[in-house]
Structure formats: structure tokens, C-alpha cells
Image (cartoon, rainbow, N blue to C red):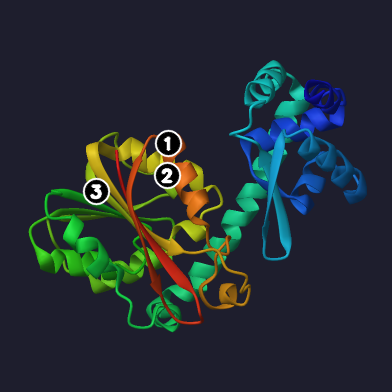
Amino acid sequence: MEIIKQFKALSDPTRLRLLFILEHFELNVNEIVSVVNMVQSGVSRHLKILLEAGLLVSRKDGSFMYYTTNKKGYNRELAVLACRQLESDPVFQEDLARTQQCITLRKNKSRRFFKTAAPRWDRLKKQILGNFNPTLVFEPHLQDASIIADLGCGTGEMLAALLDSGKKTLIGVDVSPEMLEQARLRLPESSNLELRIGELEHLPMREQEADAALMSMVLYHVSEPEKAIQEVYRVLNPGGLFLLVDFLKHNQEQIKDIIGGVWLGFTRRQISGWMDRTGFNLKHIESYPVEKTLTLNFYLAQK
């Protein structure tokens, strides 16, 4: 019986620790090993048992395998119940603190990349995009938006185009001080434009502050994409639009040497699943081939 397999999977203290941290974060095996301080073979054995019980799911990204709890399985309530019982245990809280350190290391790696790449970012991006211009994809959907947030605005290329296209209130957000400095050099002084520093997982914006939110080739840099999408939902007005362009999942790890990134793109199912769980209504998906045999997907969603 399947229920017996699930209870057996949860009957081990180490597997409960793994379930708890993977309920909160998606991690690869090396990161999990560093959190629970076990040899990799032991961790892999416990992960296999949780996977076979349907309590975890895995995905391969480049040379790494990532794990998280199964958010769609019929036994979802069992995992939630188990994790809820463990919340006050100091051992599990210590695991969460160590896991957060792993996520911080990921973020710091991205920030180091942009610290050096910011002055040449437009040229680096051109190597991948070629003649593709995401602004031309976004603009037809922004006619009714008065306040637009460019999340991960980088060097301000899209903000500059939107400033030229009409009197909109624009908010640019980026985590990199160096990228924002490049944006300030590019953009004119304007009462309709504000640049803010902050993480996409913790946007420096009020609830329901924007009519439209844009992300262009940004999500693949974010350690926790679903949290970023939840933040977009928070800052949009009811009926507001979320316009996202990002890479279709690929296996070209060398692309990270050009434009950095945490992820090797996303499947349509990943993006649509995150949007659906957040509460977005996904209205349209369109694909665009770019350089290096890569593909960009455009997603249009509404709150």
C-alpha cells in the first residue's frame, strides 16, 4: 500500500530533516550535504526513499540535480502536516538557517558577476539576443498601464525606451548597485522615473503599487523564482499585467560564462506552474529563437 511507503519514508529523523528543508527551498545534493553534514551517499539514499514515496520531486539542471517537496502530489497534505509539526524544533530551525546561508552564497555569486559585467552588460546580452528586442514584445500590452515596474532593470535599456514612448510612471528595480549606476548614466533626469535597489524576492515596493510588471531575462538569475513571482503578484494592482521573457530550458552551461545565471532556463510547465500557484491567470505564451540556438519564451499573465 502506498500509504505505508509514505509513513515509512517519514519514520527516519534524517528524512524528516530533508523533507523540512526541501519544503522551504530547492537545493542540489551538494547544498543538502552541507546543510545536514552527512556524506553524499547517505543523503542520496534518503532522497531516493523520499522520491519513491512521492514526497519529493527532482529536476536536472546542467550537471546538478535539484530537489524540493512535491507541491502537486496527492500526498501533499501529509508533507505539509509533517513539516508543520517540526516548525518549533530547534534542530530544524538550525537546518533552515544553514540552508539560508546556501541561498545567500548563490546570490553573492550572481552579485559578483554583475559587479564586473555591468559596464559591458549590453554587449554581452547582444551576443545572446542578437536582434531580438524584448521592449517591442512588451510595448503593445502596456497601453493602459500608468505605472510600470521594470524588475531587474539592469542598465536601464528598456526604461529608456519606455520613457521615449509616452508619459508613464516608471519604477526600475535591480539588486546590483553597479547595474543601477549604468542605468543612471544612461537615463535622463525625469519626474516620471525612479530607480530602487532591492532583491526580486523582496521587492522594495508597496502592495498594489504598479499596473504592469516586466521581467526581461532576469528570472534565470534568481535563486528562488517562485518567490519572485509571488512578489510580482503582491505589488500589482488587481487586473495588473505581468510580462515575462526568459530562456526556455537548455543544456548549454557555457552560456553562464557570457551572461551568468543560476538556472539554465525554464520549461513552460515550470513557469506556468509557479504562476498558477501564485494566482496569476496565464493568458499567452510565445517563443522567439535567438542566438546560440537558444529560445526565449514570452509569458503574459494577469492578476
Q: Residues within 10 Å of mark 2 (few under 14, many from 20)?
A: many
Q: Amino acid at mark 2?
A: Ile
Give the secondary structure at mark 3.
strand
Quarter of the C terminus within the rendering = top left
Residue drawn at point x = 67 percent, y = 65 percent? 62
Image position, residue 66 (x, y; %): 69, 51
Residue drawn at point x = 63 percent, y = 26 percent? 76
Q: Which of the marked residues, 2 or 1, is nearer the chain's N terminus?
A: 2
Asked where in the image residue 208 lies, by quadrant, the reply is top left
Image position, residue 180 (x, y; %): 35, 63
Q: Mark 3 or mark 1: which is in front?
A: 1
Give the secondary structure at mark 2.
helix
Q: Mark 2 or mark 1: which is in front?
A: 1
Give the secondary structure at mark 1.
helix
Image position, residue 51 (x, y; %): 77, 39
Residue at the spot of label 3:
212
- Residue 259 is left or right of residue 172, and the answer is right
Residue at the spot of label 1:
278
> Could you give the CA–CA distance between mark 2 and mark 1, rounded to whole angstroms?
7 Å
Residue at the spot of label 2:
229
Q: Residues within 10 Å of mark 1 (few under 14, many from 20)?
A: some
Confirm whether residue 50 shows in the render: yes
Does the CB distance between marks 3 and 1 fall below 8 Å? no
